């Protein structure tokens, strides 16, 4: 097969893979792995090259955190926090919406946002039922909060894990560069949602009193396990903060925390490993191989050259291009494969132009993570909540969600534009 034919075949396979992922006709892990295997079968990559293309730091970090969260969730601590938030809100539905969203956002910053919504949404349905209010405003606000909160840290959202692993940016770098805009964006979203739903979330004093009477301590199923889990979780997060001092990769910290928690809790490893999201892990493997193939053939380099032509090779226009294209694309395409494609492209842009890439990495993180709020298929957490809502008899329609979420996503990206411009590009008003 000639080099030109290889390029044509690789692009066709890649686009078909993307198309099937978007269509959801087949599980995305199967599609990604099928595309990767075809790359090997037709000789685009050798098996050795494919293994080198896989980012094991990303995979290790994901697996380690999944194990830690899988054990911690057994304690009931997340349900405890949700019920406590309801009591603090004194049964006021609008306050509950803000507090549950805050819990979701903060939890999503330190756990993965899919796990967070899996824990918070069932509690939300119980609360909405007790208060006799429509759960839809809570669900929509929790989807938005999970993606906003996940943007703030290295471990909050898979795109950030991928960016951090590929660039060497630390846990502290993400906190220092993304916390401020995320807090502003979260507050803006909550103010608008409170206004939108001010007439929908109304209940009686009797029902408020019933919800306030909940005993949050009853949610804790195992106090001993809770203490051990919180100790290891705190130790792991401290490890992320200090890992630069010890020269350790984030995957090493996460896996060390996971193994320590397994050792001190004596949980059955086979049972815990069953709760690791292996389809997600192998989805990443397939994507890394696909993008590695495009890189190997020089396709990523060519796309970077064209992107630089479009922006004139200037830092400001390039950062805005990355931010907005990431946001719009991630609203309609899963942000994980999109970011997997963008990372090598941005690196190639840096090599060609010599520009400072830091503003581009933060633009990519903000655009990809926040852009996932645009539609119901923009991020994994959105799809999970939609599935849980349908099971409980409250289906979320694609257009119904988009009418609320897409304008809020655009507001978030406008705020991000101002932030990136002022902090990194020297904009003065």
Image (tube, rainbow, N blue to C red):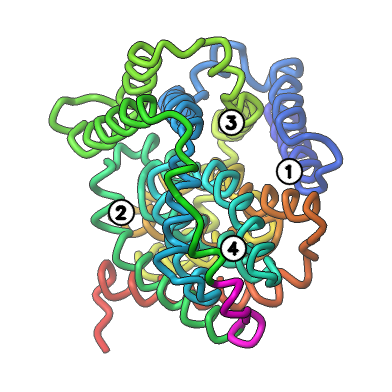
Q: Mark 1 to mark 2: distance in Å?
A: 28 Å
Q: Residue at x 52, y 67 (%)?
A: 324
Where's residue 205, x and y in %?
57, 79
Q: Secondary structure at mark 2?
A: helix
Type of secondary structure dominating the magenta stretch? loop
Q: Nearer the viewer, residue 56 or 347?
A: 56
The residue labelled by disc 2 is: 358
Q: Which residue is mark 3?
A: 284
**Circle nearer the N terminus (1, 2):** 1
* Residue designated by label 1: 18
Q: Does the magenta-highlighted stretch encompass residue 199?
A: yes
State the residue position of label 4: 373
Work out which quarter of the rendered image holds the C terminus and state it. bottom left
Q: Which residues are magenta?
A: 197-208
Dot 2 surroundings within 10 Å: few (below 14), some, or many (20 or more)?
Answer: some
Q: Can residue 163 be seen at all in this image of the molecule?
A: no
How dense is the environment of label 3, judged by Cα within 10 Å: few (below 14), some, or many (20 and up)?
A: many
């Amino acid at each position: 097969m000639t080099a030109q034919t290889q390029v044509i075949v690789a692009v066709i396979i890649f686009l078909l893979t993307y198309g099937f992922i978007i269509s959801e006709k087949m599980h995305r892990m199967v599609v990604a792995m099928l595309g990767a295997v075809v790359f090997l079968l037709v000789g685009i990559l050798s098996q050795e090259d494919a293994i080198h293309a896989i980012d094991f730091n990303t995979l290790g970090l994901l697996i380690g955190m999944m194990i830690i969260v899988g054990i911690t969730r057994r304690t009931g601590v997340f349900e405890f926090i949700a019920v406590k938030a309801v009591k603090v809100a004194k049964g006021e539905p609008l306050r509950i919406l803000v507090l549950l969203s805050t819990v979701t956002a903060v939890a999503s910053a330190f756990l993965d946002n899919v796990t967070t919504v899996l824990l918070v949404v069932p509690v939300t349905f119980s609360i909405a039922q007790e208060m006799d209010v429509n759960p839809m405003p809570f669900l929509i606000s929790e989807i938005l909060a999970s993606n906003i909160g996940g943007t703030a840290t290295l471990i909050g959202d898979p795109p950030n894990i991928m960016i951090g692993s590929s660039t060497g940016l630390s846990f502290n770098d993400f906190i220092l560069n993304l916390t401020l805009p995320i807090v502003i964006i979260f507050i803006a979203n909550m103010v608008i949602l409170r206004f939108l739903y001010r007439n929908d979330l109304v209940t009686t004093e009797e029902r408020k009193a019933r919800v306030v009477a909940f005993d949050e301590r009853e949610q804790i199923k195992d106090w001993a396990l809770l203490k051990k889990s919180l100790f290891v979780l705190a130790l792991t997060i401290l490890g992320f903060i200090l890992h630069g001092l010890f020269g350790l990769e984030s995957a090493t910290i996460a896996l060390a925390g996971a193994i320590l928690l397994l050792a001190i809790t004596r949980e059955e490893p086979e049972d815990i490993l069953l709760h690791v999201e292996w389809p997600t892990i192998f989805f990443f493997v397939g994507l890394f191989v696909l993008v590695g193939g495009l890189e190997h053939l020089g396709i990523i380099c060519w796309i970077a050259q064209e992107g630089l032509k479009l922006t004139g090779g200037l830092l400001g226009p390039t950062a805005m291009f990355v931010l907005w294209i990431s946001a719009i694309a991630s609203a309609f395409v899963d942000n994980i494969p999109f970011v997997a494609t963008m990372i090598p492209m941005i690196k190639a842009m840096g090599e060609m132009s010599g520009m400072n890439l830091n503003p581009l990495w933060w633009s990519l993180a903000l655009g990809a993570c926040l852009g996932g709020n645009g539609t119901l298929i923009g991020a994994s957490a959105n799809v999970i909540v939609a599935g849980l809502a349908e099971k409980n008899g409250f289906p979320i329609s694609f257009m119904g969600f988009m009418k609320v979420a897409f304008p809020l996503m655009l507001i978030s990206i406008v705020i991000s534009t101002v932030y990136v411009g002022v902090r990194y590009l020297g904009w003065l008003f």
